[in-house]
Image (spheres, rainbow, N blue to C red):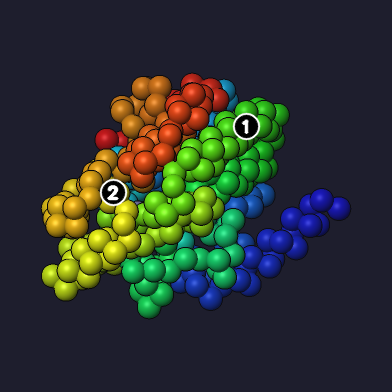
Amino acid sequence: MKSRIVYVIAAALVVTAGCSSTTSESEDSEVSPVSCISTTVIDGAVNIATTVAPITSIIANIAGGTDATINGIVPEGTNSHTFEPKPSDAATLEQADVIFINGLVLEEPTKELALANLKDGAVICELGTQILPESEYIYDFSFPLEGGKPNPHLWTNPPMAKEYAAVARDLLSAINPTNAATFAANYEAFAAKVDALDAAMATATATIPQDQRKLLTYHDAYAYFAVHYGYTVIGAIQPSSFDEPTPKEIADLITQVRESGVLAVFGSEVFPSPVLEQIGAEAGVRYIDVLRDDDLVGEPGDAEHSWLGLMRFNYVTMVEALGGDASALKTVDVSDVTKDNATYPQ
Ligand SMILES: [Zn+2]
């Protein structure tokens, strides 16, 4: 009965994936390799590839304690939105039994390279695309509807990151049933930590004056987060081209910041922005340039070099800059569930 259900779902995926997938899929392939369902079973060590570091960390938490190998592709501190994989990344991708990517059109060049080099029976699982219906995609200034690329930053929102982890648990358990109990236990432990972080962020947010729960960021990475915690995104500055905004756009933003009464505007550590600095100075508000969306804190091996550590760092930064009390966040345990043995290119 169970295998019949899997078959039906897989057949449905072929129909929906058929119209968008034009890349290097062989004519006679029955199931799209872009799927979070696999019929391949591996008894030995599973080889996993991932894209951005926060996703690598989430996967490392779920697969930890098994003999799986995990290789990230996108180096930390690079622009993941425009990242082009190196030809040598093909070697990593062709060895992978499963490739976890964010999806929502974030990593198309890497996805194409993966499709062109995919091992027989391997799948590419788009975590974000898997958990979020298209009707809930957010489009905005930096990710306009006409550009065809929705805002892909689901992972900065804890409940969505937890859903990524659940998808990974289910897919890894199907591929490597020998370790299903480990994946399940890891997920339970990780989910508890995510829930604790989520609750602490809600507590900390409540200490920010209501009229200060506003975000003006350079890189537009907090759209889904803002909905979840009740912040208003009053603007994001980085245009969809990843160029600097025009003088007119800058002047409008300065007016907007003055009128909003916010205490701080937030830059990105990955995208240093003289423009945001100028907006902050001219509008008379603090400019905080340390937020990160896909560059983990510290170096691989450091205690806070993890999705949990990254999110806590960002949340503490925001809460304190907006006049709140971040002490609830500071006591949250951000250690990984198990030792993180993933490879994070730098
Ligand atoms: Zn980003």
Residue lying at 51% horizontally and 43% vertically, measured from the top left: 206
Q: Is residue 219 left or right of residue 99?
A: left
Residue lying at 39% horizontally and 51% vertically, measured from the top left: 212
Q: Residue furthest right?
A: 1
Q: Quadrant of the C terminus?
A: top left
- Residue type at mark 1: give it: Ala
Quick one: label 2 or label 1, which is nearer the N terminus?
1
Report if residue 9 is visible in the image.
Answer: yes
Kindly state the secondary structure of the residue where label 1 is placed: helix
Q: Is residue 260 left or right of residue 133?
A: left
Q: Position of residue 214 (x, y in %)?
A: 39, 55
Mark 1 surroundings: few (<14), some (14-19) or many (≥20) residues within 10 A: few
Q: What number is the disc on residue 192?
A: 1
Mark 2 or mark 1, which is nearer to you? 2
Mark 2 surroundings: few (<14), some (14-19) or many (≥20) residues within 10 A: many
Residue lying at 38% horizontally and 78% vertically, measured from the top left: 146
Residue lying at 30% horizontally and 49% vertically, measured from the top left: 263
Q: Quadrant of residue 199?
A: top right
Q: CA distance from mark 2 to mark 1?
A: 31 Å
Kindly state the secondary structure of the residue where label 2 is placed: strand
Q: Which is more toward the observer, 138 or 123? A: 138
